[in-house]
Amino acid sequence: DQDVAKAFWRDQFEHFEASRFPSLPSNAYVPQVDKSAQSSFAPEGWSAKKHTDSTILRAAWAILIHWYTRDEDVVFGSIVSGRQAAIKGVEHIAGPTIATVPLRIRVQGTVGQLLDKTQMQAAEMVPHEQFGLQNICQVSAHAKLACGFQSVILVQPSSASSSEQQSVVFVGGLEDDHERIREFNTYAVMLECFTDKSGITAKMSFDSNVLA
């Protein structure tokens, strides 16, 4: 229902005001991804966690943005698969159903409270993920401001081995293929996280003129 989706996204960004992270050199600047980095790590207690991988990594990214901007109210883009969307026959759709949505997180309270709120928000958002970024930015002035995010996160399960990891956005992974990265990524920073029971492999692509 379009009206329900409009109301949902309008409520999500009511009274939203926050600094953009990362900030661009000018309003007219168009990010050009030219660098990438990768790291694998195994957080303590990762295999025994009670929250989803996506929840933990979204909350962690929000805390990092808060640390840089000092704003409790932060926003970034999240790439979602769309396979859980309330669309008839979505499981039979051939090809990608991915969507990018603006994600607002208030970094307040304890870490546990932040994780609970982030996970609940994700569940409530599922029916409205396919509304479209171009439509979300039109529901209110605050939503339009939120859609100006310049960092994006994608969380997806790891494939059988690290050598076989494939990005659903960048076919073949990030590596050093900057031309392919530029084609798909129009944001200053993109963090792509592959997760499994043992830990995380994080791949970041970014514009070195924006993020040194």
Image (cartoon, rainbow, N blue to C red):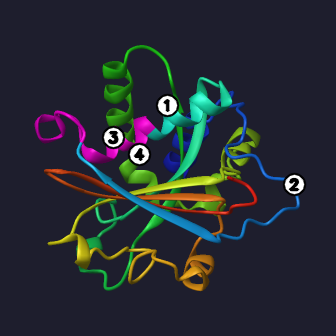
What's the CA distance linking mark 1 and mark 4? 20 Å
Give the residue pinned by disc 4: 125
Residue 55 circle label: 3
Give the residue pinned by disc 1: 63
Rendering coords of residue 10 (x, y %): 61, 39
Q: First in sequence: mark 1 or mark 4?
A: 1
Residue type marked 1 = Ile
Membership of 45 in magenta stretch: yes
Viewer-nearest of discs 1 and 4: 1
Q: Badge 1, how many Cα within 10 Å: few under 14, some, many 20+?
A: many
Give the residue pinned by disc 2: 27
Query: Which residue is drawn at the image coordinates 53% and 66% (left, top)?
Result: 36
Residue type marked 2 = Asn
Image-based side of 165 in relation to 61, left or right: left
Say which element carries label 3: helix
Q: First in sequence: mark 4 or mark 3?
A: 3
Q: Magenta residues?
A: 43-60
